[in-house]
Image (tube, rainbow, N blue to C red):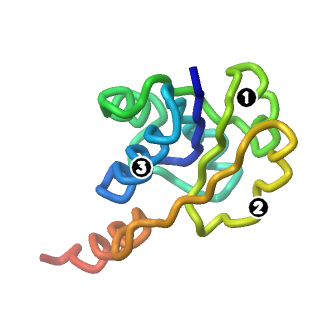
Amino acid sequence: MKKVITYGTFDLLHNGHINILKRAKELGDHLTVAISSDEFNALKGKKAYYNYDTRKLILEAVRYVDAVIPEHNWEQKISDIKNHHIDVFVMGDDWTGEFDFLKDHCDVVYLPRTEGISTTQIKKELQGNKND
């Protein structure tokens, strides 16, 4: 069985998220998604709309996702790859080169982002429409 992993916050799930999850799943037989814990988001200076448990519940309902695990820090990727017997690490191409150090442990694939959509964009647009 070929196992794939990807990482992210996955807040305000949108078609860009679904596209990357679908394409990641096409690279193997099993897709694990590591989502940033609320504590890790705080360390990164990020605040998700949904808490970890809600984001996990939503992702578990996506048909391309086989398992969801927490991401507690930047350094855990190598241990996740080893502990979950991962063959392919996937990230969006806005991270190209950042995770090449993982090539000693598995294949590393950077997938193109879906144009015209991001959680940041959605949040900005919602903020701009506060008075509507």
In which image quadrant can residue 129 be found?
Answer: bottom left
Mark 3 surroundings: few (<14), some (14-19) or many (≥20) residues within 10 A:
many
If you read the primary sequence from the N terminus, does the residue marked by circle 3 or circle 2 appear first? 3
Q: Residue at x 68, y 29 (%)?
A: 86
81 left or right, relative to 116: right
Which comes before the other along the chain, label 3 or label 1?
Answer: 3
Quickly name the residue at label 3: 11
Q: Are marks 1 and 2 in contact (CB under 8 Å)?
A: no
Q: Is residue 80 left or right of residue 52?
A: right
The residue positioned 43% from the left and 52% from the top of the image is: 20
Find residue 73 and report its image quarter: top right
* Camera-side mark, 3 or 2: 2
Mark 1, residues whose alpha carbon is within 10 Å: few (<14), some, or many (≥20)? some
Dot 1 or dot 2, earlier in sequence: 1
Frontmost residue, 13 versus 6:
6
Image point (76%, 65%), residue name: 97
Residue 109 in the image: above or below residue 83: below
Disc 1 versus disc 2: distance between alpha carbons? Answer: 17 Å
Q: Quadrant of the C terminus?
A: bottom left
Residue pointed to by mark 2: 98
Disc 2: CA contacts within 10 A as few (<14), some (14-19) or many (>=20): few
Q: Please provide percent x and percent y for residue 43.
A: 71, 50
Q: Secondary structure at mark 3?
A: loop
- Amino acid carrying label 3: it is Asp
Residues at discs 3 and 1 in contact (Cβ within 8 Å): no
Q: Secondary structure at mark 2?
A: loop
Name the foreground residue: 53 vs 14.
14
Residue at mark 3 to residue at mark 2: CA–CA distance: 22 Å
Q: Name the residue carrying label 1.
A: 80
Q: Quadrant of the N terminus?
A: top right
What is the x, y in percent for residue 65? 41, 31
